[in-house]
Image: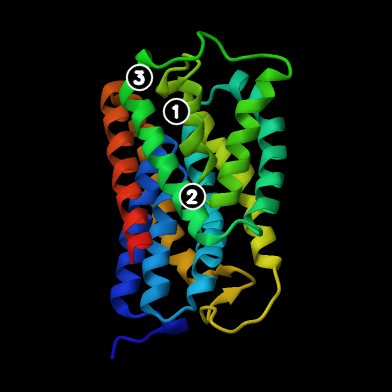
Amino acid sequence: MFETIAGYALPAILALGVAGALIGAVGGLLGIGGGVIAVPVLLDVFAAIGVAEEARLPVSVGTAHLVVALAAAPALWGHARAGTLDRPILRAWLPALAVGGVLGLLAAHVVPPALALVVFAALMLALAAQMLAGRRLRIGADLPTGLLGLVPPALVGFLAAGLGIGAGTLSGPVLGLFGVPLLRAVGAGAAFNLVVALPSALVFALESGPPDGLPGDAVGRVAMVAAALLAGPAMLVAPYCARLARRLSERMLRGLFVATLLLIAARVLSNLGG
């Protein structure tokens, strides 16, 4: 009775729409890439509509990359208009971040899905712990330079591309390790999301292989209808929340960031249990 285009039932459509609005909110407010929300939700939706188990994670990651890219564009525009883009951080990090993203895409095709989910959940917990520690947990007072300075952005790009997380989710806490305030990191995170997610989504969409068990709307390893249902609300909400971020205290932003990460980690771990 509830079946619609590409086999998505009405409850799945509603779940994706709500998740999309949440993606736009956390992307605009916190610079979090929507992948941390999209991947767990997509895993549940694809299980519900009968996608083959071995196809769920790669299609979820590929779809999440497209959602992150689409949501990041208006969020980035909102930060640019609000004056919250930190251009020195962008110049220092973007080249190594892009290289790390390429390496992460290569790794995504050889890492077992169960291991990828464990790493995903562990990262969420580690990031939450770092955000809770705040200034008590720092590696240095300034960003490293030279060859050493290439390591953090390359690692962020690698993990973001390989797991569909969204580079901004990782970059905020990592920049915090070097004394960068969260408010400075948020705008840069939106740019990092776009730089990693857009080429990653293209690579997943161009993948070929046996079509058995894929969702009906799949182009390569990207579910286009699911991506649209997530990205539409996200793109509407993200610019407003990007402007709102300037009005909130860092303490409040930090609390929202931690709560989001803990909820996501719990949901991913529950998928492992199932």
Residue 71: give its label: 2
**Marks 1 & 2, CB-CB < 8 Å contact:** no
Colour pattern of the rendering: rainbow
In this view, the residue in front, 25 or 11, is 11
* Disc nearer the start of the sequence (1/2): 2
Dot 2 crowding, Cα within 10 Å, few <14, some 14–19, many 20+: many
Marks 1/2: CA–CA distance = 20 Å
How far from the left and from the top, in percent, is residue 246? 36, 25
Residue pictured at 35% horizontal, 72% vertical: 13
Residue pictured at 35% horizontal, 87% vertical: 3
Marks 3/1: CA–CA distance = 9 Å
Dot 3 crowding, Cα within 10 Å, few <14, some 14–19, many 20+: some
Q: Is residue 96 left or right of residue 71?
A: right
* Disc nearer the start of the sequence (2/3): 2
Residue 173: give its label: 1
* Disc nearer the start of the sequence (3/1): 3
Element at badge 3? helix
218 lies above or below 157: below
- Residue 60 in sight here: yes
How far from the left and from the top, in percent, is residue 168? 50, 37
- Residue under label 3, please give it: 134
